[in-house]
Image (spheres, rainbow, N blue to C red):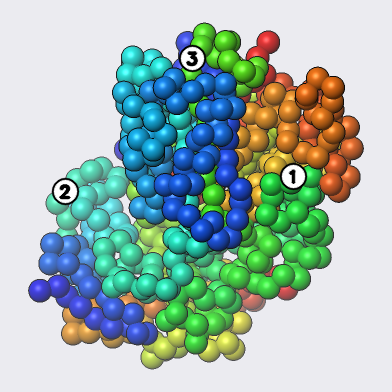
């Protein structure tokens, strides 16, 4: 009995044997972002995986993180390839650097998550919001429900943005 | 476990011991009207004939694919080849150069003596890279973290690195567009190329935006085709039809803990090339300044720029200036993708750029120059539209293969003395 869901008309199916993804998306369905933290070296990892990419440790625990971060890079998609997104162009795929674990285990490392820009109630962002986000924007996580045990984590702009500087956007 | 910190010297003892002796391809089309199996046979026949060999002389087969092509053992049977050794690898744009290394290893291990490496794909009419949505399957496994975001095609997946490069280094779209401009000029002198029309920077910037920073013309074309090369020892190579393209060095490199962790690890504007470079250049016994022609994987204009930068053809961050300086054009110091590459000639996951550099080293690029009384092309070195694309006095070429930002491979070849 796979864990299944529907999101924007796409079918999601997490195999029973895929415990890592099942747990990750079940926490999301509960409105919580949790990541695997290695019990040996205490570093978190993303996306979910079978072992620690830093020390190869097997043992881990799911720890809650704030779900707040800064846009590190992004792409604005104007030509959708997947049918589910054709009605939603332009949309942003954001690369969000979480506040936790920045600069660890070394200077250039961080937990950086991909996700779309969305409204506060987790609908894909309309064009005026798309135009407002860029590198440096502060965002927080929201969840779009896809089934009883699956929700898709997305990002919405924080009400408070860094004072002074506007986010960097592709110059046009 | 900092895999990126390793600096390993290349295999000096194999330098000059192997060569590429045959190259071949099919036509580049959008709509081949045949199977990948038939395409593979077509290209391999041409490569074997080009080497001056017969199918019975081939005893090794290496192929790569993404679950979208025929297995090499079927193709061998169709050609009358009875391989001692064959292997089919799951891989994309970083496979060609790496498989040249595997071919050398298989020969060195005594498993075979002469190896065909090929890629056959109906990249337009059957399996399009990145998917088309024609047959959407349920999303599961690793794809749960990309497809639900409409983040799936190579352009979408690589774009955050390209955007960050613009942000960090001030790289401008009009600079990178010059990669397409240069390759289109080269393709105009390549009768095989699918897109032979020369384009301008304005054409690139005015083409529709696919996903920032990639305009339509920043992206390679989708074609149906197969391409093949033949690798053997330098001793056998000396007896064959053409001057051998002597292999000086090969390298393959991953620089990320996992393929899905490119964005977690290291500067995201730096690609595997940076860590492959020391092994490549020490193995080859020379450096980027000694290279006359590059073949840098151009799935996108930006992939070419990033690889040229990280293999050391220019300083980090100066790729935009390098690719827009005229250096990479025919007539410049170090032309890149003289065939027009994947942006203009056709898309075959890297093999075609090796094919081109072998011909450049033979000083026999198949352009429209007249055939002389000796049966060879009399190259004019007039690089105007429809003219020559042979580079003068080519001695050393470098092929730079890109799988993703996180893994790549490379090959340095030289004209035989």
Chain under label 1? B
> Which residue is pictured at 63% across the width and 64% down the height?
B214
Between label 3 and label 2, give the one nearer the viewer. 3
**Near-viewer residue (A109 or B352):** B352
Q: Is residue B375 left or right of residue B251?
A: right
Point out the image quarter for the N terminus of chain B: top left
Q: Residues within 10 Å of mark 2 (few under 14, many from 20)?
A: few
In the picture of the structure, the residue carrying the numbered disc 1 is B190
Q: Secondary structure at mark 3?
A: strand
Where residue B18 appears, x then y in whole percent? 51, 17
Q: Is residue B75 left or right of residue A35?
A: right
Chain under label 2? A
> Which residue is pictured at 51% across the width and 34% down the height?
B45
In the picture of the structure, the residue carrying the numbered disc 2 is A58
Where residue B368 appears, x then y in whole percent? 81, 40
Numbered label tally = 3
In the picture of the structure, the residue carrying the numbered disc 3 is B233
Mark yes or no: residue B278 visible. no
């Amino acid at each position: 009995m796979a864990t299944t869901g529907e999101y924007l008309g796409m079918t999601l199916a997490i195999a029973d044997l895929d415990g890592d993804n099942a747990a990750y998306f079940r926490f999301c369905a509960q409105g919580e972002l949790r990541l695997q933290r290695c019990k040996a070296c205490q570093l978190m990892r993303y996306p979910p995986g079978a072992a620690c990419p830093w020390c190869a440790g097997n043992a881990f625990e799911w720890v809650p993180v704030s779900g707040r971060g800064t846009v590190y890079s992004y792409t604005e998609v104007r030509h959708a390839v997947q049918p589910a997104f054709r009605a939603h162009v332009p949309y942003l795929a954001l690369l969000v650097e979480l506040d936790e674990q920045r600069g660890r285990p070394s200077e250039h490392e961080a937990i950086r998550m991909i996700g779309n820009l969305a409204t506060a109630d987790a609908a894909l962002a309309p064009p005026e919001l798309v135009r407002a986000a860029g590198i440096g924007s502060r965002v927080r996580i929201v969840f779009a429900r896809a089934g009883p045990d699956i929700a898709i984590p997305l990002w919405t702009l924080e009400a408070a943005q860094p004072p002074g500087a506007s986010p960097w956007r592709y110059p046009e | 476990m900092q895999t990126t910190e390793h600096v390993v010297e290349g295999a000096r003892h194999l330098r000059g011991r192997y060569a590429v002796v045959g190259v071949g391809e099919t036509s580049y089309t959008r709509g081949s009207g045949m199977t990948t199996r038939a395409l593979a046979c077509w290209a391999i026949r041409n490569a074997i004939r080009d080497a001056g060999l017969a199918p019975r002389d081939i005893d090794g087969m290496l192929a790569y694919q993404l679950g979208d092509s025929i297995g090499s053992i079927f193709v061998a049977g169709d050609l009358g080849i009875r391989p001692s050794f064959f292997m089919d690898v799951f891989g994309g744009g970083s496979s060609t150069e790496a498989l040249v290394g595997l071919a050398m290893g298989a020969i060195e291990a005594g498993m075979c003596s002469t190896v065909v490496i090929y890629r056959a794909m109906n990249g337009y009419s059957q399996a399009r890279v990145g998917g088309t949505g024609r047959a959407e399957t349920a999303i599961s496994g690793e794809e749960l973290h990309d497809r639900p975001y409409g983040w799936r095609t190579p352009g979408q997946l690589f774009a955050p690195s390209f955007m960050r490069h613009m942000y960090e280094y001030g790289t401008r779209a009009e600079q990178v567009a010059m990669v397409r401009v240069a390759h289109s000029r080269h393709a105009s002198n390549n009768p095989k190329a699918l897109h032979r029309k020369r384009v301008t920077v304005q054409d690139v910037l005015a083409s529709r935006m696919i996903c920032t920073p990639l305009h339509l013309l920043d992206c390679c074309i989708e074609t149906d085709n197969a391409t093949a090369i033949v690798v053997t020892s330098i001793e056998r190579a000396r007896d064959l039809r053409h001057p051998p393209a002597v292999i000086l060095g090969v390298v393959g490199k991953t620089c990320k803990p996992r393929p899905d962790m490119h964005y977690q690890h290291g500067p995201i504007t730096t690609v595997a090339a940076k860590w492959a470079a020391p092994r490549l250049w020490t193995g080859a016994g020379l450096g980027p300044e000694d290279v006359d022609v590059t073949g840098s994987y151009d799935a996108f204009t930006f992939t070419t720029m990033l690889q040229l930068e990280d293999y050391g053809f220019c300083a980090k961050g100066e790729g935009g200036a390098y690719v827009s300086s005229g250096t990479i054009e025919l007539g410049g110091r170090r032309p890149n993708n003289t065939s027009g590459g994947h942006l203009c000639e056709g898309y075959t996951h890297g093999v075609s750029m090796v094919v081109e550099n072998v011909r450049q080293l033979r000083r026999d690029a198949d352009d429209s120059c007249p055939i002389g009384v000796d049966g060879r092309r009399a190259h004019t070195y007039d690089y105007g539209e429809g003219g020559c694309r042979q580079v003068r006095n080519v001695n050393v070429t470098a092929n730079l293969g890109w799988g993703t930002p996180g893994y790549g491979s490379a090959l340095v070849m030289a004209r035989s003395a």
